[in-house]
Amino acid sequence: MTKQLMKSAALIALILAVVPALSQKYPADLILGKWLNEDKDAHVEVYNEAGKYFGKLVWLKEPNDEVTGKPKIDDDNPDVNLQNRPVLGLVILHDFIFDGDEEWEDGTIYDPKNGKTYDCYMEIDEEGTLKIRGYIGISWIGRTTYWTRVK
């Protein structure tokens, strides 16, 4: 291989490595960290596990049940076997994959306030707000909530 051909091959390899990285609007791990939900009554910590993104409840404004005074439990869960687990520490975001551009998709969100799980995607807007869209079946039948990063 000639010296010129080797330089050209190296330049092409460099371009192929750099262009995909430059085309990403956001880095995949931008979503990591703690987020305050729209109701301002919970913090969810988003983390990466084996290339997928999850989120667990790490703070509740009212961590204890008003009636019993004990820590809140997942009593609205349709699975009777899960109804006694504590809400604090509960993983509510599951299995999100970064699409390489600006969305974390193909995941689910669990709402402990009603015991329901929804298909979901997430994206971060220009102001740094996390837009979360939960839906049933197709994304235009659903609800959107906005979370802000905890500093």
Image (spheres, rainbow, N blue to C red):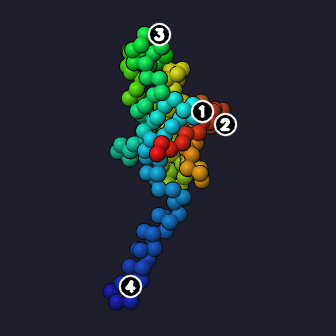
| Real-space Cα separation, disc 4 to disc 2, in angstroms | 50 Å
If you read the primary sequence from the N terminus, does the residue marked by circle 1 or circle 2 appear first?
Answer: 1
Check disc 2 and report its element: helix, strand or loop. Answer: loop
| Real-space Cα separation, disc 4 to disc 3, in angstroms | 73 Å
Which residue corresponds to mark 3?
A: 67
The residue drawn where x is 38% and y is 44% is 48
The residue drawn where x is 54% and y is 20% is 114
If you read the primary sequence from the N terminus, does the residue marked by circle 4 or circle 1 appear first?
Answer: 4
Observer able to see residue 42: yes
The residue drawn where x is 53% and y is 63% is 23
Q: In which quarter of the image is residue 11?
A: bottom left
Assess whether mark 2 and mark 1 are in contact (beta carbons under 8 angstroms): yes
In the rendered image, residue 39, in percent from the top left (x then y), is placed at 57, 31
Residue type, label 1: Tyr
Assess whether mark 1 and mark 3 are in contact (beta carbons under 8 angstroms): no
Label 2: how many residues lie within 10 Å, few (<14), some (14-19) or many (20+)?
Answer: few
| Real-space Cα separation, disc 3 to disc 1, in angstroms | 32 Å
| Real-space Cα separation, disc 1 to disc 2, in angstroms | 7 Å
If you read the primary sequence from the N terminus, does the residue marked by circle 4 or circle 2 appear first?
Answer: 4
| Real-space Cα separation, disc 4 to disc 1, in angstroms | 51 Å
Which residue corresponds to mark 4?
A: 7
Residue type, label 3: Val
If you read the primary sequence from the N terminus, does the residue marked by circle 3 or circle 1 appear first?
Answer: 3
Assess whether mark 1 and mark 4 are in contact (beta carbons under 8 angstroms): no
In the rendered image, residue 110, in percent from the top left (x then y), is placed at 49, 28
Which residue corresponds to mark 2?
A: 140
Which residue corresponds to mark 1?
A: 135
| Real-space Cα separation, disc 3 to disc 2, in angstroms | 38 Å
Q: Is residue 8 above or below residue 105?
A: below
